[in-house]
Image (spheres, rainbow, N blue to C red):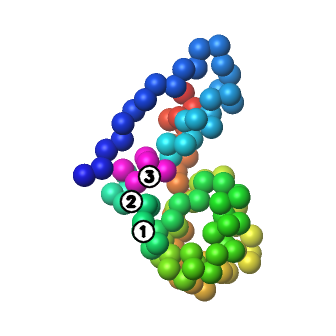
Amino acid sequence: MKYFRVGYISITDRMYYEYADELLLHVRELVELENGINFTGNAEIAIILSEEELEGFMENAVNLSQCCKLYMAHDILLDAEQEQKLRDQKISVNIIPDYYYKELEG
């Protein structure tokens, strides 16, 4: 059984961009809960939430050889070489829907 424990993030006297990163840290858990998966210790699925994570994932041959399904943030764009690598490895890409982010925006 997996659950998500909600905490309080104070937004008093702060602009959205000042606390947005704190909220976005929970996208990973939301994806796990909605899809009934667990990224921890599971090499067959992966999640990428930033360009830096994408670069690291694409450079790691072990990731590419073991992964079957990739969840990727809606604002990350793959270049042609990255798309081809994922196709060659038969990795399906699931784009994380906008509503995850809209909910977190307030």
Quickly name the residue at label 3: 31
Task: Nearest to the eye among marks 1 and 3: give it.
Answer: 1
Disc 1: CA contacts within 10 A as few (<14), some (14-19) or many (>=20): few
SS state under label 3:
helix
Q: Which amino acid does label 2 sit on?
A: Asn
Please tell me how many numbered marks the rendered image carries.
3
SS state under label 2:
loop
Quickly name the residue at label 1: 42
Residue at the outermost top position: 13
Q: Which amino acid does label 1 sit on?
A: Asn
Quickly name the residue at label 2: 38
> Which one is earlier in the sequence, the residue at label 2 or at label 3?
3
Gap in angstroms between the C-alphas marked 2 and 3? 9 Å
State whether residue 100 is above or below residue 44.
above
Residue at the outermost bottom position: 88
Q: Is residue 29 magenta?
A: yes
Q: What residue type is labelled 3?
A: Val
Residue drawn at (69%, 30%) of the image = 17
SS state under label 1:
loop
Q: Is residue 49 magenta?
A: no
Left or right, residue 102 beside residue 56 = left
